[in-house]
Every structure is written in structure tokens, then in C-alpha cells.
Image (cartoon, rainbow, N blue to C red):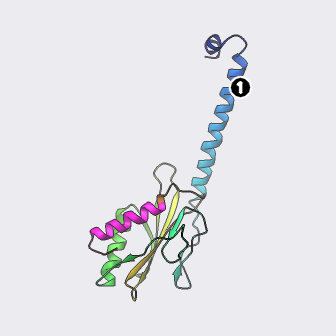
Amino acid sequence: LFRSAAWVIGEGAEADLRILIYVIATLMVLFLGSFTYLSLNSRKARETGLVGAKLRPCPGTPNCVVSEFHDEKSHTEPFAFSGEASVAWKNATASVTSLGGRIEKDTGDYLWATFRSKIWRFVDDVELRLDVAEKTIHVRSASRVGKGDLGVNRKRVELLRDLLKARGLGA
């Protein structure tokens, strides 16, 4: 392979071509290794749960959205509902699982679910909090590692919103 490629690009270039191939192979190994590291690191559970009866705020990175805090970058609207809170909660739980979420904890007014990306198996956390008095379900969706998520968490919340609307909730 090296000798035939050197014939195309000229004499004496065989060593340069070999170095280029080694550099490219090294960069590929580093790239794949870093994603593998992040994937394995994302499987470690992060802090979830309520803080002062609210969902946790986002850490200031674009890979998180939350409805309880009004930071312009990470804010999303909560899911509004009418009717029985228990029916809304049941529909919200069913919607999370239908999107591929795995329910880790459900207390009836707080839910924590995990989602895994298809290729690298990164883990994201989704949390819901039922506010019966305001007839809303607050939501937080966040990646466990990295800073960016290509908008995956915001899209997930909007898909959840669409599912809740389809189930008759005014989400």
C-alpha cells in the first residue's frame, strides 16, 4: 500500500505518507477513546432529587433544561394540565416510558428517569415534579457529562410535551 501510494505522489514520499497514516490513526484512537471514557463516566449516577421542594437548577451548561428556574438559556415551560392530578401524573409517567425512559424512582409527585443515547450509550436524567396547586408538572432534563448535547434534552422535553398533549393534557 505504501509503495503504490508513493508511486502516485512521487519518490521519497513513502515515509511522509506513513507518518500521516500514523497521525490519522492516533487521532482516531484518541477520539474514540475520549467518547468511550465519557460514555462510561456518564453511567455514574449524579445528584438528583428535590432541593427545597424544587428541581435542581441547571449547572450553566447548554446540555440541561429546567422549568423551575428562569435562566434564559436553560428555561423551558412546565407542563400544564387540567383535571385530576393523578391522571396527569399517570400520563406523564407513561409518556416518559414510551419515549424510552427507564423509571428509577417514582414517589407519586416526583419522578426520576434515565435515558441512554443509541450509539455511545450516554446517560441523561429526566426529572418531573408534580405541583398540584399550580396544576403543572415541572421538568428537568440534563446530560450527566460534557457541556453540549446538540439540543437533545430540549428536544426530549418537547417530545414529552407533544405526547402529553396527544393524551389530552394541555401541556
Mark 1 surroundings: few (<14), some (14-19) or many (≥20) residues within 10 A:
few
Instruction: Specify the farthest residue to the front.
Output: 72
Rendered image quadrant of residue 10: top right
Q: Amino acid at mark 1?
A: Ile
What residue do we see at 36% from left, 73% from top?
A: 92
Secondary structure of the residue carrying tag 1 is helix
- Total numbered labels placed on residues in the image: 1
- Find out whether residue 162 is within the magenta segment: yes
Is 41 placed left or right of 160 in the picture? right
Is the stretch drawn in magenta largely helix, strand or loop?
helix
Instruction: Specify the farthest residue to the bottom.
Output: 133
Q: Which residue is mark 1?
A: 19
What residue do we see at 32% from left, 66% from top?
A: 163
Is 159 placed left or right of 148 in the picture? left
Q: Nearer the viewer, residue 11 or 18?
A: 11
Q: Nearer the viewer, residue 30 or 169?
A: 169
* Quadrant in which the N terminus is drawn: top right
What residue do we see at 33% from left, 66% from top?
A: 162
Q: Could you tell me residue 112's position as x and y percent?
A: 47, 72
Residues in magenta, as a range = 153-167
Is 97 placed left or right of 18 in the picture? left
Q: Could you tell me residue 53's position as x and y percent?
A: 52, 85
